Amino acid sequence: MQFLADFLPAGVAMHAPALIVVIPLIAAALAALMPNGRVAWIVALLTSAAVALLSLNLLGQVISEGVVSYHMGGWAPPLGIEYRVDMLNVALLLLVGFVGLLCVIYALPSVGDEIAENKQALFYSAFLVCFAGLLGVTITGDAFNVFVFLEISSISTYVLIAMGAGKDRRALTASYNYLILGTIGATFFVIGVGFLYMATGTLNMADMAAILEANGHNRVTQAAFAFIVVGLGLKAAMFPLHVWLPNAYAFAPNFVTAFLASTATKVAFYALIRFLFSVFHPDVSFVEMSFVWLFAVVGTIAMVVASLQAVFQTDARRLLAYSSVAQVGYMMLGLGMGTASGLSAGLLHLMNHALMKGALFMALGAFALNFGVRRVKDLAGMGKTMPASAMAFTIAGLSLVGVPLTVGFTSKWYLVTAALERGWWWAVAALMLSSLLALAYVARLLSAIWMDSPPSHHGELMQRRLAPWMVLVPMSILALANIYFFFHADPLVWLARAAADAVMGGH
Amino acid sequence: MWTPELSLALALAIPAIGGVFVALLGSRPNLREAATLIAAVLLAFNVAYLVEVAQGHPTLNLATLAPGLHLVFKLEPLGAIFAAVASGLWIVNSLYSIGYMRGNNEKNQTRFYVCFCIAIAAAMGVALSGNLLTMFLFYEVLTLSTYPLVTHKGDAKAKRGGAIYLSILLGTSIGLLLPAVIATHFLAGSTDFIAGGLLAVNEVTPAIASILLVLFAFGIGKAALMPVHPWLPNAMVAPTPVSALLHAVAVVKAGVFAMLKVGTYIFGPALIAVTPAADALAWIAGISIVLASVVAMTKDNLKARLAFSTVSQLSYVTLGVMLGSPLAMLGGALQIVMHAWGKITLFMSAGAIYTATGKTEISQMDGLGRYMPWLFIAYTVGALSIIGLPPLGGAWPKLFLLQGAWDSGHGLLMVALIASSILNVAYLLPLSARGFFSPPEEAQLKKQPPIMVILPPVITAAGVVVLFFLIGPLRDYLAPVFLSSTLAAEAAL
């Protein structure tokens, strides 16, 4: 993979960590000035392509140089802001970059349908701000900077969700709920960071870790830990802090749902891992205790309860939203094992889940685009009327269940193996139970799509109508990636393993 | 040029490519059916070659998913025989399908033949798999590819049957079989099929072995061990050729074959003999054998009766595995072959009667034997073989199982075997008696049945007779599997 490091010019490569955040920020301002939605979309497309390339280049740099440390404005840490890229966050950057690119391609027809023409340029601008925020959270090595970017991404997300009001005004209350809860989360997080600053006198995460290790922990750092876990947990939709998520996903524009589901919660979850492993020490007693008694136990409950809730949903996007909460439970369980193999299994599932949910929400968006489908029963006959989208939906749906030939199987294999290594038979049982529930809710969707006949309109059956190619192509890429990475699990498994080692190995 | 490894790949490729051709030729039925038949014949020749070279254990790595996770084909005698049965009967069944599907003017015939090809490819995958992971993969493909066949009619009843079919088979495989596979991988570091038993070689304690054996026994839902059997009677909503080849041969036999393979190569006879759960499972199999036969007697619908008969007969194989004696396991292996030929004859007869008269209930079939004597003779031969009368193939597995039960100290289970044979007489032969001896009702035949639905059951009935005399070579071919694995396992323990 050595070649990856060299494909951008040295001057660009040197500043890649800064550019990956700065480019989308500048592009956001540009997009807002564009005369119409289509030109703004081109700006967004070029930006996300640039981000994808930069993330690939950063992967090459991390592989060849180890940790990449970039000093913002030349100010050396711990005083200056440091951007720090290791195997863990480069994996997330790749995920956000490439899934973001695919989502942007998908955006043109989808956004064109759902957002009023005069708001489209602003919509893309808000999206780019959110994009920059997510990348910023991922790349920064500064605790306060995490808060800033978290807020940047959150505030733009509130806007993006509220834009769904053009189709359904309930998007406004969904967005408002998320705004209240998201702000509470952000406040908790910043209080936690404040406490840590009080205890250590620094905001640089690596510096914090060193000082905490030297000085030991006290009530202040324990309180900081609690605030940070709750704050980030809210953003990551960790059960039972997930209540904002189902409505937000159900009423946001389809493009926003597809993008958020495959990136936003993942990034918050990354930040959590970063704090647990890189700032706090996993061997510290209260951190270690939180693994088993908070993450593993709550994750297991989420896997079962949220899946059960998903089974009984009538709105297709809400159904998948509850499924997402359950999938975050899988990641929490992997994290809660507190072993390198557990964490890497959780991270593998994090990446694989982005592939599944991206494809699923895109396909739902395609159904909505052509036929205005929202409810599960309205999916009837989509296998006949939109066969290609239905096929992509089916592949990703089977992946969600964990059927072999899909990546869902690979993540489950590694999660179960990690649970067995830990001797957690109950976790194996919960994983299987949750898979069966996933089978139940996916079967509901698939049987409507393939088995029911399309509804008739004035006595005539609904006609076949293919989705536009800009929807089909990114959706098919994601769906086929679900199969491709089953047969070539190596790159993702290696990445997850290297990412886990990057935070576990240092200790 | 023609290497065993190439032949392994072809076993998967021939039906898959056949499926592509069937799909492409969808608008021209005669060419489409020709594609199916050509694929079936080529596959049979290819498998015949594989049977010959199986002792050399050729191996083919299909894909490496990640370090330590491989998709592998590895040939051994059990798999070769299963592949031979499935591919041989595919030819006969394809002829029959053409007669049946055209005779009944079924819709979506192209989809039907394509799914059939995929299902056969998956059955080949199960037969040739070299480790549990590969077997699990093709096992699931087999479930998914047969679902459209089960729900072929597309009405509410077919959908309901299909939903039960899919939920039980996927539910047991994901909920029980998959954890068993992963736990095996975790305990042994691989999932390879090894002579003597992977777990025996890795010295797994009897307690852990018990848990795993229970997970495997119920996780392999296709083996239809009670109480995970309801998918099989519910799958009878499918067109009869599907019931005949898939639910008497490929799918259910893939289930018991997987059970046999797990018993032989993952546990090994010696480990099963000391695993406490095996005794309990042997009894559950015994109860399955008798209970399913009793239920079969209560069914008037011919296909439903045959379905419960299959549930009962499949448990013979499971029983053979759980007894843990090499002789009983050999009996189980032979049962896979013999029951396949017998039961496909019965199913094809049921479908031929339906094609000719539209009748599905046994009580309506009085006197039909006078109109279709060859068909009823074929049915009777098949039934007698299932019952276990010599000189028909079905006699041998019963004999070996009885001996195996006695040898392993389960004399009481012999009673279950004998009781089942008596029950078989009571539920299979009345149709023959009605057909030949009861006075016929008025206007029996709707139409003269096409030759394509009469000839295939006659061929398989003749095959049942031939198989009785082939026992010598068959035993010599299969016995080393169980004997050598017993020796190897004893050395390991």
Image (cartoon, coloured by chain):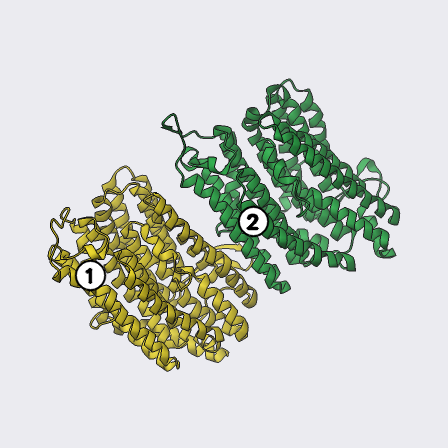
Chain colours: A green, B yellow
Say which residue label 1 marks.
B431
Could you say where residue A426 lies in the image, as x and y percent from the top left? 60, 61
Could you say where residue A225 lies in the image, as x and y percent from the top left? 79, 50
Using the image, name the chain to which the residue with label 1 belongs: B
Could you say where residue B190 lies in the image, as x and y percent from the top left? 52, 64
Disc 2 residue type (three-letter): Leu
* Quarter of the rendering containing residue A108: top right
**Do the CB atoms of the residues marked 1 and 2 lie less than 8 Å apart?**
no
Q: Residue at x 44, y 66 (%)?
A: B217
Query: In the image, is B304 to the left or to the right of A464?
Result: left
Disc 1 residue type (three-letter): Leu
Using the image, name the chain to which the residue with label 2 belongs: A
Q: Secondary structure at mark 2?
A: helix
B432 or B244: nearer the viewer: B432
Q: Residue at x 16, y 51 (%)?
A: B451
Query: In the image, is B349 to the left or to the right of B167?
Result: left
A298 or B326: nearer the viewer: A298
Q: Secondary structure at mark 1?
A: helix
* Quarter of the rendering containing residue B434: bottom left
**Relative to B141, residue B130 above or below:** below
* Quarter of the rendering containing residue B269: bottom left
Say which residue label 2 marks.
A308
To the question of a shared chain for discs 1 and 2, the answer is no
Q: Categorize mark 2 by other alpha carbons within 10 Å: few (<14), some (14-19), many (20+).
A: some
Picture quarter with the C terminus of chain A: bottom right
Query: In the image, is A285 to the left or to the right of B257?
Result: right
Q: CA distance from mark 1 to mark 2?
A: 48 Å
A365 or A12: nearer the viewer: A365
**Relative to B278, residue B186 above or below:** above
Q: Categorize mark 1 by other alpha carbons within 10 Å: few (<14), some (14-19), many (20+).
A: many
Q: Is residue B258 visible to us here?
A: yes
